[in-house]
Image (tube, rainbow, N blue to C red):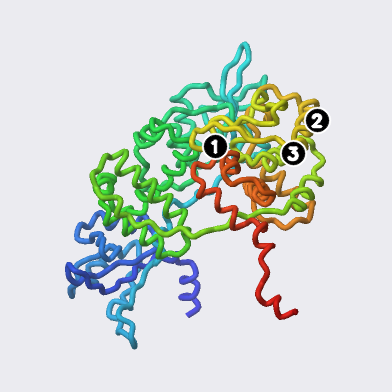
Amino acid sequence: MVFHVLVKKKMKVRPVIYLNHRTSKQGDFCALFFKSNDAILRRIWQNGWIRWNTELNAFTAPSNEKTIGHLIDVFDDIAAINRSYYHAKLKENTEQVTIGDTHYFTGVLEKSNKLGSITLVPYKTESLRCIVISFKSNKHIFKVLSDCQLAQWNKDIRAFILPPNRSVIIRFLEEITSLLRVKLHNELTIVDYRILQLLFEQAYSKSLYFKSCPIEFIKFMQLKAYSHNTINTYYYYVLRLLNVYRQNSLTQINAFDSIEINDYHQKMIGEKKYSEQTINQSVNAIKLYFKGYLKRDIQLEEVVRPRVGKTLPKVWSKEEIKRILDGITNIKHKTILSIIYGSGLRIGELLKLRLEDIDSKRMRMRILGAKGKKDRYTIIGRYTLELLRQYYKEYKPVKLLFEGQFGGQYSTTSISRILYNAINKSGVPKRGGVHSLRHSFATHLLESGTDLRYIQELLGHNSSTTTEIYTYVSNKHIEQIKSPIDEFLA
């Protein structure tokens, strides 16, 4: 008896395939439910009588008296067959017992664990032109780069370097992104489609059945002059669609019509963990892929678009903004947050500001290539201008108004960290991130009596409807309304 217990502890637990008797329009089937497993999937591909059933959303086999025996034989060496639910009796009002994973997207685009992050930095001297691999001291990263034959150690600059060669960088990314997260320095611009594809996909584990989006889809979006962030976002949503349908080839998915796409988004809605904005973004991306890139003449207008709820912007009061800024001692940090709030900028707009964009005589600021590739002017406050003059004397920026430690654009994560630290120091409640400073700017202008049309121009909104959201946040009119219960005090 003791011997059997010891043996049982040493045995490796095998994956389990649960069998369930299901009925569909095509007839009776034996449905197979199991956790994602490459060995099981390979065995299924080798047995053509086990097929994917779109209606049941499961692999199925014809249901007859020999089915269970055949399945036990097929999977005998790699998985256990559980048939306890195959003949399950219905209880009370339950119509059917279903075993399996109800989360439609579970296991899709799983994030892969990385040993650390590296940054590719363009580097140039009179005698050397290369890509420097920058990273914080980390023995695991050093070991990975030492083992990589493409990365060469340079004694003069004491860093690993790569030649600025397309094929070398592609091979380097193909080898390294499964272990390390690769970021780009602000001065390094990538226009090669294959490199962009590798960077877009580096976060995910690539199993045997992983499908990439066509590189031509990236090219199509670039020709449409979409921003890098939009291309990255749309690529992600299409990539997700392709990998949800693991059992389908790219050709089969490209042949989908509005029925399949509606079903895909309906399942997202059913999981109740995806916001309306997320599903709408997915609809936009997939619509662009099918109608724009594939030139499919299908009625994608039939795709169900969930109704997006009205979410009010989170804002701080003027007093709270002052407390946040007063607690910052670093002049650069204080100037950055003051401009975002005092001029109502998006974080990307601040990062692109140049010295010549500041017009101190007319107390205005020029914003070039903002969202929607639009230029505009916005205001500069006297408080902000004084900070700008102090900041310039101390830091003397050359090209961009706010430059990073090693040149190029300042980091968005650094700005978020500045605000986070300032909020903690001030004791002000956290009501959002950096963008809430822009929301606060608009709300405070409205409360001070500024016409909504002028606020729309300062913010760079296309539609007045977008700007009108601040009327729901403003206290100006609410404070003038008295509750009817106050009449009881008379």
Q: Residues within 10 Å of mark 2 (few under 14, many from 20)?
A: some
Task: Report which residue position mark 1 lands on.
Answer: 182
Q: CA distance from mark 3 to mark 1?
A: 27 Å
Q: Nearer the viewer, mark 3 or mark 1?
A: 3
* Residue 38 tag number: none
Q: Position of residue 206 (x, y in %)?
A: 42, 46
In the visual, does 29 lie left or right of 489?
left
Task: Report which residue position mark 2 lands on.
Answer: 390
Specify the farthest residue to the front: 490
Write the residue at 65% across / 75% down: 484
Q: Nearer the viewer, mark 2 or mark 3?
A: 2
Q: Nearer the viewer, mark 1 or mark 2?
A: 2
Task: Report which residue position mark 3 lands on.
Answer: 333
Check contact, mark 1 vs mark 2: CB within 8 A.
no
- The image shows residue 407, relative to residue 78, as above or below, that is above
What is the quadrant of the C terminus in the image?
Answer: bottom right
Q: Position of residue 255 (x, y in %)?
A: 24, 47
Q: Position of residue 475 (x, y in %)?
A: 67, 58
- The image shows residue 429, relative to residue 392, as above or below, that is below
Q: Position of residue 200 (x, y in %)?
A: 46, 40
